[in-house]
Amino acid sequence: MDQSIYTELKRVCNEFCIKGSFDSYVELKQGNVNSTYKVHFTQADGTPKEYIVQRLNTFVFKQPIQVMENIDKVTEHIRAKSTGKLALHFHHTKERNTYVIDEYGFWRLFNYIPSKTYDICDDLNVIKNAGNAFGEFQMLLGDFDASLLHDTIPFFHDTERRYEKLIFDARKDPEGLLESVRPEYDWLMSVRDQACALTRMFKEGKLPLRVTHNDTKINNVLFEKDGTEALVVIDLDTVMPGLVGNDFGDAIRFAANKVEEDSPDFEHAGINMDIFRAFTEGFLSQTAGTLTKNEIETLAISCFAMACELSTRFLDDYILGSPYFKINYPEHNLVRARCQIALAKDMLIHLDEMQRIIVDCVKK
């Protein structure tokens, strides 16, 4: 145990007014952005209590106070509406802040929830429950004014801007790589109009702005340790105003692909329709009554749009020499782009079937 970390964590917990005696800590290695620690306390009556302390990566989250203001507003709204149910709770300092800033970093603290997570899963019950959890998150925030939140990553899911950046960087072609990816680039340009449909509809006032999670991977849902029930949605650092289709489409893009996001066997990528149906059933069981007609009618194309959007980002990063996404080998971003393009192509083939499933789920 590192004594300096022990001392710092103890001091941070004291700032958050945690009662009892600080006993020990363990660093949790999952996650690639923030530093996470589980701290163990013994309360006055002798019972144990555990918390999660995180040091935010302020290189990634350049406006950490705004991130925490968003999280605080959203979690307190959810807690008020879901009395008696498990909900994330971020502790406050004496000054009522949800963060502590010191020479060692930007810190936050929340309750530890015994649970398990899934990075990849083909259990349809788990997938449905993940859809239910993200749908409940959306439903509970359906009456929250999204304009009250900071736009912490401006234009994050503005697909038109993502395309414009790819076009701009391709013209510069600083690494001389464009011709080697000409088929991928040309295909993305050929579907640009369809891929940008959601962004365009929002700018035309046809889709409402909502509170969105913006990282709806299945591993951002906590599940029962000994079961398949979803407990709570976590990792709220990217919560901000957005479109419901972005959350739904990104979840499907990640969970329903037949291969992993960076699989070298990208020719086998495609949408698993059983997983699509399971997630959709769970998601719409919570949201069907709150979504507008246009939102429901664009859920299927949102999956295609998200796959194309990420394709443009991977391809753009590749032709720039991969300065943004972490890579394990020089062609890693190209492989990622090809995998998302193959998925998007398969989604186009199944688009009508996807929409029929959505309509069936809404009727239920």
Image: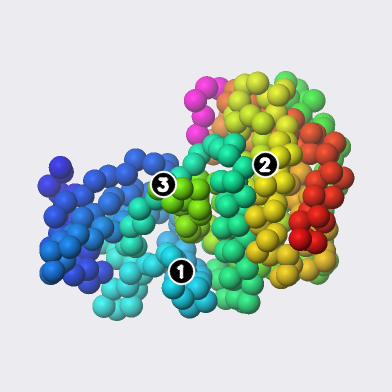
Please name the residue shown 62% across and 60% down the image. 135
Q: Residue at x 63, y 68 (%)?
A: 139
Q: Is residue 189 visible?
A: no
Span shown in magenta: 325-330
Query: Is residue 289 visible to us here?
Result: yes
Q: Tell which circle, 2 or 3, labels the residue nearer the N-terminal end.
A: 3
Q: The residue under label 3 is which amino acid type?
A: Asp
Drawn side of residue 224 relative to residue 101, left or right: right
| Residue matched to label 3 | 226
Q: Amino acid at mark 2?
A: Ile
Residue for point 26% across, 78% down: 94
Residue to which mark 1 is pinned: 85
Quadrant for residue 294, please give it. Answer: bottom right
Q: Nearer the viewer, residue 254 or 56?
A: 254
Q: Give the secondary structure at mark 3.
A: loop
As helix, strand or loop, the secondary structure at mark 2 comes to helix
